[in-house]
Amino acid sequence: MFKWIAAVLGYMYFRFPGAILGFIIGTLIDNWTRGSGGAFKQMFGQQEEQKVSPGDFELNLLSLCSLVIKADGQVSQSEMDYVRSYFVQAYGKERANATFRTFNELIKNREISASRISQYLAARTKYPARLQIIHFLFGIAQADGRVSEAEARVIQEIAGYLRIGRMDFESLKAMFFKSADNAYKILEIEKSATDAEVKKAYRNMVKKYHPDKLGHMDEAYRKGAREKFNKVQEAYDQIQKERGL
């Protein structure tokens, strides 16, 4: 857009040579405004990009990761390693390192806003991808052996901003917390559910968490989707065994 505006203005003042110079300058401006820092400009009150780019997604996701890592007041090396491993697997070592460097430069002396980042992503990602974000954040929290209550609260807050349903959040949480009715929570039903209701819930969860719903995303995300899918299968198998189905 800027290249044509600049070309017209250049022609008005300097005729044909001005039009050429304006077109070149305008092209440079267009390229700059399409850079990967759009989400962070919006996050800190600057101009918002109309569509999230891969660079935006990585930086925003890394911001949410940092909130979970710091939630319990302890920065665990195992949690940091979990995040780095994911980013390397998803984007390659060189791009992952570049993302970490850019993140460190941009958030220096600035407070990360969970609501602003999550709402930005919620408007630009499909629901299955947002479910996977929450699953990934729980995976980070569990990397040191357990998910603390403080970490769970932060993830629940992020889930709210991402417009994740309460039942869906509890289902994902149950995959990381052991309890007597875990299998039922994962299938989003009560322990008093009939056998027919259990089967129906299982079919619904298979549709919701099927890895094909994230076929457009990176392999690391598809791997996480398969992990969720397996948890649903394990929960159903456990209930079938308990009930002798």
Image: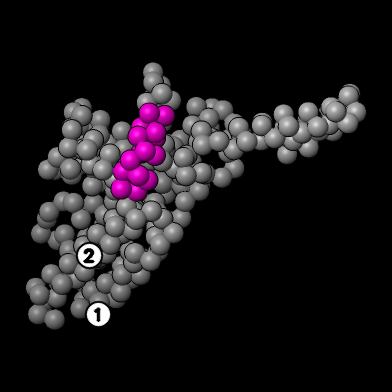
Quadrant of residue 8 within the rendered picture: top right
Residue 43 drawn in magenta:
no
Residue picked out by circle 1: 196
Residue picked out by circle 2: 230
Residue 172 placement (x, y as % from top left): 26, 54
Quadrant of residue 240 within the rendered picture: bottom left
Tell me which amino acid carries mark 1: Ala
Residue in view at x 38 percent, y 28 percent: 101
Q: Quadrant of the C terminus?
A: bottom left
Comparing 203 with 33, the one in front is 33
Query: Residue 234 got which mark?
Result: none
Quadrant of residue 34 within the rendered picture: top right
The chief SS type of the magenta part is helix
Q: Residues within 10 Å of mark 1 (few under 14, many from 20)?
A: few
Q: Is residue 191 above or below residue 112?
A: below
Residue 98 drawn in magenta:
yes
Q: CA distance from mark 2 to mark 1?
A: 21 Å
Question: Secondary structure under badge 1?
Answer: helix
Residue 210 placement (x, y as % from top left): 34, 66
Q: Which residues are magenta?
A: 88-103
- Identify the residue at the far front of this view: 17
Discs 2, 1 touching: Cβ within 8 Å: no
